[in-house]
Image (cartoon, rainbow, N blue to C red):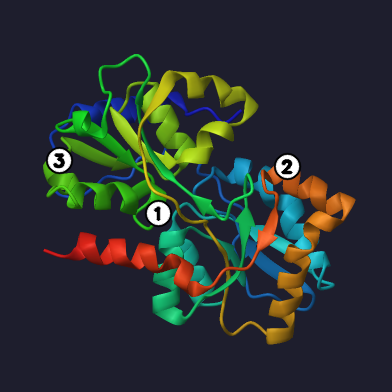
């Protein structure tokens, strides 16, 4: 079960009573255990990273079969690693300690600018290659609009997250606010499910998440969806992509892409995708993420 340990919940409750600090503290609500340390691929092995937006156990169960089938499609085996933050995964990909990474839109833009990371494919979910961000509040609480969160506590997911950090920050900036001036205190939950839990339990007043997280909660956490409500939805933005290092062998890169794009056509592939909540994979260009760049520039402007 992926329930927040009592000690972590107690720590967050204490944090909620503290005065606003200079930085945004990191609060972990899920199991931090990570898989084996990464290493450079050798022989017939490719190293993949899981998306930090999910707990390691949840992400492993969800994406393992997809990753293994992608590697098998190029005649290789897969080793899977997990890290807590997108920043850590970007560093691993840059230094080629991993070759393939499940990322978010914001971290892709960072990785692209830093070392030229390339999009291998993007998932199609519910027939779309776009996603939205949602701001949540407690279902039984008085907050009805995002504006009602002024002076309240708020959970972001990750500094590099589009839906979990950039989108709500851009919303505030477009109305003349910043997280520091609008909220009483903020935290990083390092996971969209963690942010839902934080709101549902009353540990924070609001949070920003991928909208589809509410339809994709594990069975043991499904009741959480009824404890929160959506008070704001963003316009659509590009789906979180799968990235590769630009130095990956071109034939291997194209083989992996073909394996992903054709995965839905086989019974085994269709089953793996269904368990991951994915229809199929498609290719999108870098320009699909220009909106992310525009929002980042606006947020960074004085």
Residue highlighted by disc 3:
182
Circle 2 packing at 10 Å, graded few (<14), some (14-19), many (20+), is some
Q: Quadrant of the N terminus?
A: top right
Residue highlighted by disc 2:
275
Secondary structure found at label 3? helix
Question: Gap in Å between the C-alphas at discs 2 and 3?
Answer: 39 Å
> Can I make out residue 163 in this image?
yes
Give 197 or 240, whichever is nearer the viewer.
Answer: 240
Give 59 or 297, whichever is nearer the viewer.
Answer: 297
Give 3 or 169, whichever is nearer the viewer.
Answer: 169
Secondary structure found at label 2? helix
The answer to whether 120 is drawn above or below residue 37 in the figure is below
- Mark closest to the chain's N terminus, 1 or 2: 1
- Image quarter for residue 259? bottom right
Residue highlighted by disc 1:
161
The answer to whether 171 is drawn above or below residue 100 in the figure is above
Do callouts 2 and 3 mark residues in contact (Cβ within 8 Å)?
A: no
Residue at 54%, 19% in the rendered image: 223
Residue at 13%, 34% in the rendered image: 19
Question: Gap in Å between the C-alphas at discs 1 and 3?
Answer: 19 Å
Q: Is residue 195 rendered to the left or right of residue 184?
A: right
Q: Position of residue 34 (x, y in %)?
A: 56, 50
Q: Position of residue 97 (x, y in %)?
A: 57, 72
- Mark closest to the chain's N terminus, 1 or 3: 1
Q: Position of residue 95 (x, y in %)?
A: 51, 77
The answer to whether 162 is drawn above or below residue 151 in the figure is below
Circle 3 packing at 10 Å, graded few (<14), some (14-19), many (20+), is some
Q: Is residue 91 rendered to the left or right of residue 49?
A: left
């Amino acid at each position: 079960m992926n329930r927040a340990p009592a000690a972590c919940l107690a720590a967050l409750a204490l944090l909620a009573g503290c005065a606003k600090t200079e930085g945004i503290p990191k609060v972990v609500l899920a199991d931090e255990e990570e898989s084996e340390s990464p290493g450079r691929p050798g022989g017939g092995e490719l190293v993949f990273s899981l998306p930090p937006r999910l707990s390691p156990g949840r992400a492993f169960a969800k994406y393992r079969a997809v990753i293994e089938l992608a590697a098998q499609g190029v005649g290789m085996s897969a080793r899977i690693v997990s890290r807590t933050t997108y920043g850590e995964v970007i560093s691993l990909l840059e230094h080629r300690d991993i070759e393939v990474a499940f990322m978010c839109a914001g971290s892709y833009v960072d990785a692209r600018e830093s070392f030229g990371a390339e999009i291998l494919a993007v998932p199609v979910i519910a027939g779309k290659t776009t996603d939205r961000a949602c701001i949540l509040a407690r279902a039984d609480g008085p907050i009805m609009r995002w504006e009602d969160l002024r002076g309240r506590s708020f959970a972001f997911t990750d500094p590099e997250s589009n839906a979990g950090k950039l989108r709500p920050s851009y919303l505030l900036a477009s109305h003349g606010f910043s997280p520091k001036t609008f909220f009483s205190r903020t935290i990083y939950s390092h996971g969209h499910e963690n942010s839902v839990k934080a709101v549902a339990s009353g540990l924070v007043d609001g949070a920003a998440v991928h909208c589809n997280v509410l339809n994709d909660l594990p069975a043991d956490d499904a009741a959480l969806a009824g404890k929160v409500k959506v008070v704001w939805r963003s316009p659509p933005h590009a789906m979180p992509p799968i990235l590769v290092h630009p130095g990956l062998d071109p034939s291997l890169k194209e083989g992996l892409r073909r394996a992903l794009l054709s995965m839905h056509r086989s019974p085994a592939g269709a089953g793996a995708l269904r368990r991951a909540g994915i229809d199929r994979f498609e290719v999108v260009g870098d320009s699909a993420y220009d909106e992310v760049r525009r929002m980042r520039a606006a947020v960074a402007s004085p």
